[in-house]
Image (spheres, rainbow, N blue to C red):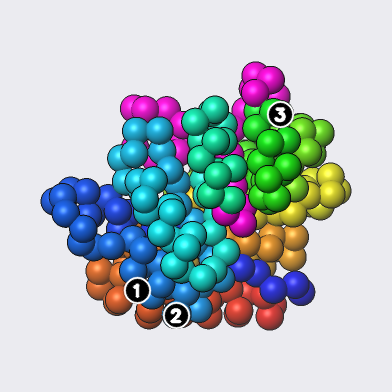
Amino acid sequence: MTPMRLSVNVDHVATLRNARGGAFPCPVEAARVAVEAGADGITVHLREDRRHIRDRDVERIGAEAATRLNLEMAATEEMVGIACRLRPAACCLVPEKRQELTTEGGLDVLRAGPFLGEAVRRLAGAGIEVSVFVEAEAAQIEACARLGAQAVELHTGAYADAESSGRAPHLARLRAGAAAARGAGLLCHAGHGLTYESLGPVAAMPEVVEVSIGHFLIGQSVFEGLPAVVRRMRAVIAEARAG
């Protein structure tokens, strides 16, 4: 089975910093620590309201963390301009609503306006790997391929939030989505809400080559320390890939 990347989302280190003001804790330092502990990349979501990650955080992580940077963002003129200037390794286009606490579902590619396709073209033209955060639905995934995206990130929130006894249909849907991504010629990533307990079945899907984990990982670091949590996540992935 191909290796799987673990991308650590450090958004909520910035949330904690912003709650008090000042510069501590520093998401750039968190990115460095995560990479030293075995993370394969760092994910940040530069939201339009800058509620956690800020522009300077993205600039510094890209320059100082020495790893694959995945920039999550809405498909807006402002964000496309920032991404084309900074040129992270990857961008993931996500839906964004000001009133939401966190991203609530996949982007509806079938009903998106024409700017989504333009955003994909401009980002790809800047040498950025473009993924789209979608539900595990074949029609949405195939629409991403038609737009020229190179990858999809499957929304794992419903699966991760379900009780263990009720996860089977969600997991089957994710497996079908991963197969649809492969059939459409797209790389397949996954993320949202994953924990130690829910990660394994997703990591066992051979089509999934990257998972992005943030809220649980940063929260658990309060109790275990960031390096320990990253190493434990890596161990879960290794065990699942070994099958």
Q: CA distance from mark 2 to mark 3?
A: 37 Å
Q: Is residue 21 left or right of residue 56?
A: left
Bounds of the magenta span? 88-115
Residue receiving disc 1: 226
Q: Main secondary structure of the magenta part?
A: loop
Residue receiving disc 3: 117
Q: Secondary structure at mark 2?
A: loop
**Label 1 crowding class (10 Å Cα cut-off): few <14, some 14-19, many 20+?**
many
Could you tell me the amino acid type at mark 2? Ala
Within the magenta stretch, is there residue 104? Answer: yes
**Label 2 crowding class (10 Å Cα cut-off): few <14, some 14-19, many 20+?**
some
Disc on res. 37? 2
* Rendered view: 198 above or below 175: below
Q: Residue at x 41, y 72 (%)?
A: 32
Question: Is residue 178 visible in the rendered structure shown here?
Answer: no
N-term mark: 2 or 1:
2
> Which picture quadrant has residue 219?
bottom left
> Residue 143 at what x, y percent from top left?
76, 32
